[in-house]
Amino acid sequence: MTLPSFDEILVPNDQTQAREEHLARFADLVGNAYPSKFDRSALSGREDTISNLKAHGPVAAASDVMAQVRATLEPGTRPPAEVKDKLNETLKELGTVRIAGRIATPIRGNFVHLTDGREKLQIYAKKGQFTLARNDGEADRDSDQAWEAWQILDHGDLIGVEGYLFVTNTGEVSVHVERLYFLAKALSPMPDKMHGIEDAEIKQRQRYLDLIASSLKVAGDDEGLSTRETFEVRAKTISSLRRFLEDNGYIEVETPMLTPKATGAAAKPFKTHHNALDIDLYARIAPELYLKRLLVGGFEKVYELNRNFRNEGISYKHNPEFTMLEFYCAYMDVNGMMDFCERMIQESVRRATGGLTVNYERHTIDFSAFRRLTMKEAIAETGRSEPMSDDGLVACFEEFVEPNLIQPTFITDFPKSISPLSKASPENPQVAERFELYINGMEVANGFSELNDPREQYERFVDQAEARERGDDEAMVLDEDYVRALSYGMPPAAGIGIGIDRLVMLLTNKHSIRDVILFPHMRPERRVEQAEQENE
RNA sequence: GGUCCGAUAGCUCAGUCGGUAGAGCAAAUGGCUUUUAACCAUUGGGUCCCAGGUUCGAGUCCUGGUCGGAUCACCA
């Protein structure tokens, strides 16, 4: 086996060579170019990250004062010196701040911005007025050597500074550096500060670089959420869903990802092998049957928010692994679940966006009230005649109705034949007590009254097995232990699965699932020589 | 898998009819040193995705391939 060399992984060019030289000089100047820590100060009662200082700390306060002063001035004019001087006295009394971050602008002159990934803060270094801290416990380098060090810092390096806050002539709150710390080197050059990374492949493969680019970007804020903001909304959405469920008495559980049978949904699984047991296992396609075993066991409200794996096509709304929220509530039926789902999604929209409407592509999606239609009613609205067979009904729905369901809509009364885990309606035994939620033509959720009659559940599995015999390789697989579990008595219950990636797409106005997954599935990267060898 | 489009400097992109490989940003050197995306001057930087073909000559035309994007089909 031959491993690639360091130079094959990081191909040297004029930029990396300059940075390597700077790194060597820093190693000499500070003793250790990769120190273990940097303690940030806590002026505002919390660690002085740049974001905290700008949101809650003295930087926020001073910026407010300057903003008020500026509002009284002609655009482009500098704030009066007396205002600035007074503010600077107050800031200096606060004492020393210690902040760390990535150098967000090329070094040019005395000013540089640092970023903590979200916010930027300007720092000012004046020759003769700061020293360079050593990372090996020795005494600081003097101000001449510190100035030498300042000049060989590169765009993207990670540094810490100790100094006092002040306001510049143009009114920007900055840190006057008194002590400079070198924390880590950026050997590779930073992306273009105006354009960032445009190549979708690099954005996805090297998400770290995409995130750096979005934190360095200077202008052009009309392009919607940055990559950073998109994943912050994703995190907020997920935590709001968890909070909502827990406030309503649900507990989070974890059920197997590696399962002996891929069942609980209609999908093709990934197969793997356990060596010690010498058995094949499948990455789960749904946690559903495990969660309902917990209803049998007496957990009345359970949820699981985690990945499912389906060995199928990749598209703007499909990734081989995707995040699904599934939850089950004992003694509730399909109608109760629709009510609950509606309230929960409204809450997550409110948390993510502050309101109940979302602009998505050319549409404004209004989450304030979800429509409810039976599948047949939805087809009738298109003016088409109603197909007779279940398969025809579903095909007609998927082709003519689904793409046009832009506003949040619950579709109910699915054919029982395609709903093997769902209770049949007492009024119409051919119809399942099931719904799917559609938004912007995408299925976002799927829920039903859970079938809890073990004998009927067995018969449904038999029907699925027959469909499989006929060539439907996505028909559901019989789970004997699940039938056995139902035989002990499962309370009447409703359950639902919500596609989190798709929900986040809607909340962030992203049109590809890959834009809301940090590391979406991609073909492995191959170097040219490798590809050539394999082709021979 | 089908169709269409794309790949040129570290990044963002030009490149006309087939005739010496270009710009901005970034980098290096020097100057400036309270600036607000781009300060001034100079310099360096290229497997034009890969392989083959046509041609006196290919970034450009042709064939095959790799990777990516859009879209259609299947799937949540």
Image (cartoon, grey):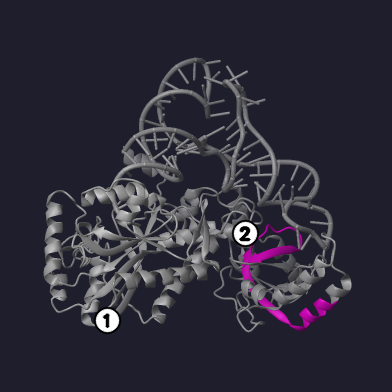
Give above or below for A66 relative to A387: below
Q: Position of residue A345 (x, y in %)?
A: 43, 68
Give above or below for B26 relative to A457: above
Residue under the image location 13 percent in, 76 percent down: A487
Q: Position of residue A353 (x, y in %)?
A: 54, 66
Q: Position of residue A472 (x, y in %)?
A: 18, 51
Q: Considering the numbered disc 1 on the image, is that residue within a helix, a strand or a loop?
A: loop
Between disc 2 and disc 1, the foreground one is: 1
Instruction: Tell me the quarter of the picture where residue A110 sits.
Output: bottom right
Q: Position of residue A43 (x, y in %)?
A: 67, 82
Image side of residue A289 versus residue A62, left or right: left
Residue under the image location 60 percent in, 55 percent down: A190
What type is the residue that disc 1 sits on? Phe
Residue wearing tag 1:
A299
Image side of residue A141 versus residue B4, left or right: right
Residue under the image location 17 percent in, 71 percent down: A482
Q: Are marks 2 and 1 in contact (CB under 8 Å)?
A: no
Q: Are marks 2 and 1 on the same chain?
A: yes
Residue wearing tag 2:
A216
What type is the residue that disc 2 sits on? Leu
